[in-house]
Every structure is written in structure tokens, then in C-alpha cells.
Image (cartoon, helix red, strand yellow):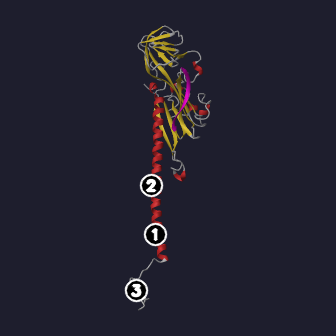
Amino acid sequence: MSRCSISHWPEHAQGYPRSRGFTLIELMIAMVLGLIVVAGVSSIFLANQQTYRSNEALSEVQDGARTSFEMLARDVRAAGLAGCNTTSGRGVFAAAGYAANWYTDWGTAKVLLGYDNATTDPAITGLTGNGAPVAGTSSVHILSTDAISAVVDTDSGSLITTNEASGDLQNGDVIMVCDDEQSTLLTISALSGKSVTVEAHAHTFARSSPIAKLTAHVWYIGTNPLGGKSLYRLAMTNTGGVIGATPQEIVRNATDLQIRYLQPAVGNSFIAVSSVTDWAAVLSAQMTLTLQSTFQRAGTDSKPLTRQFTSTATVRNRVL
């Protein structure tokens, strides 16, 4: 019985190819090249991400400025707007006690009234927490009337009958009724169809005298629920027949509002509140709003993106 022998010839001697691996130096070079490629791709990704965030932040603050100025400028343009002429020293009459409320104190000089420091504005000094005014920022009172809700058919002193029922009027609404002789602020105490019960008044309004609801707003910078700052509008509201004022957050991350005014008698440039001598003669308001991005590292040096925007609005019924 023969014994099998095992050959111990080298593999290359038996026709097998000689196998080889990567040297340590080759592996290190490959790893370095791979890291360079990964670092380059990551850098491009992060740069594109930062560019996207910056563009998104810029779009955010621009949208905030557009919304703010659209609403604020609309209010400024409508300051003092009423269904009848309330200028030329005629003024607006009001029931006893109305002058104590900022939202019904319709003196000729009160329909547009500014403050350089919102914390000294009597309409908002009592606000605390959300909506509390921020020191060093401007505020402005704007009074006007809404669209005409009805017209007078007959007036018997405390009962006004309208030509048709108006769904826009509610119990507790402060309304302005005016004709060619007088404009008066009245409060609706009862409403039924065409019958509108108000305070007794000496003047009898002519037929077809317009009736419009009073609107009153204060624009300012206040603290928001997150502890930051926002643009607020304090609006006169009627809740269940009770008149009050509710702060409404308009645009978040608005950090500053500065308003200057044009009074031609003082000069041809916009002036601070302290330089205004006659609010009834103010024709325009120049509003500068500072906004920040929500993303806190959208700007340079890992800070919020901050932009200032300026807009000018003219009081329409003073330049006709």
C-alpha cells in the first residue's frame, strides 16, 4: 500500500498567482484622501445650509415688515376718518366721562398722538406680562371710524331709528353719528332691528346722517409669551357689551419701533414727538421698525439676522 505524499512546493511554483495586500502607507494615503473628500462635501453642505437659513431668515423679516407696515400704515392713513367733517375746529362731542378713556377722547389733536417712550403712554402703562410696553420704543394712538353701518331715519333724543337694520351694530358699541352741524360719540345701550337706544343728546340729527363704529388702536413694542419682543396693537374691543382694550400680537421678533412726524409749520423734515407743537397739524408719520430672525444663528458671528425697515404714511383727510 503506497503512502500519498504531500508536496510543499511554493504556490508560485505551482502556477498560482502571488497575492498581495495594501501597505500601511497606502492605507493612510487613501484614508487622508477620503477625509479630504468628506470634509469638502461637508463644508459645501454646511455652507449651503447656512445660506438657506440666511435666505429663509431674510424672507421672514421681510414678510414681518410687510405685514407690519401694511396694517400700521393703513391705520395712520385712516386717522381721524369719519363720516362727516370733524375738522375746522368743530371737534367731536362726547357723553360725560368719555374724555377719560383714550379710545373715545376724540379731540382734533388726539386722533393721531405719539409717545417717544411707550412706558409713558397712559393707554398701555398698566399692561404687564405679555404685551407690556418696552422702554425706549415709540407708541402711537390712532382713532378713526369703521365703514358706515347705517344712516339715521329719525332721531328722538335717546332713540335713533335707522333706515334699515344693521347687522354690524351691537349692544355696547361706541358709535359716531354726524351731520353737517355736529359729530357726536354715543354708546348703544339697546338694539332691536332699526331701533338704536343711546344716551340722551341735545342735538337732533338730520335724516340720512351716517352712523359708524369707532375704532381705536395703539401700536407699540411689547414683550411676548416667549420673553422676546413683538409688535403689538392694542385694540378697543366690545365683549358682551363691555368696552375694553385687548393687546394683539402682530409680528414676533420686532425689537424696536421709532416714529417721527411731519408738521409743516415746524419744518420740512420728520421730527421727534418732543418737537411736535400741534398734533392736529401733523400730516405724515415715518415709521422705522427693527426685526430679528427667529433662527438665532442666521446672521454673522452666529447672531440673529437683524434688519431695519422704514415706511411713511400720510393722514389722508388732512391733505385733501
Q: Quadrant of residue 94?
A: top right
Quadrant including the N terminus: bottom left
**Alpha-carbon distance for marks 1 and 2?**
23 Å
Q: Is residue 244 magenta?
A: yes
Q: Secondary structure at mark 2?
A: helix
Q: Which residue matches tag 2?
A: 48
Q: Secondary structure at mark 1?
A: helix
Q: Is residue 213 magenta?
A: no
Circle 3 Cα neighbour tier, 10 Å, few/some/many (<14 / 14–19 / ≥20): few
Residue 280 x/y as whole percent: 52, 24
Q: Which residue matches tag 1?
A: 33
In the shown orientation, is residue 167 left or right of residue 202? left
Q: Which residue matches tag 3?
A: 12
Amino acid type shown at disc 2: Asn
Quadrant including the C terminus: top left
Q: Secondary structure at mark 3?
A: helix
Residue 194 x/y as whole percent: 44, 13
Circle 2 Cα neighbour tier, 10 Å, few/some/many (<14 / 14–19 / ≥20): few
Amino acid type shown at disc 1: Leu
- Confirm or deny contact between disc 3 and disc 2 (CB under 8 A): no
Quick check: can you spot residue 37?
A: yes
Relative depth, front residue between 56 and 144: 56
Q: Quadrant of residue 15?
A: bottom left
In magenta, the rendered stretch is: 241-251
Amino acid type shown at disc 3: His
Residue 204 lies, with reference to residue 305, above or below; the image says: above
Relative depth, front residue between 17 and 189: 17
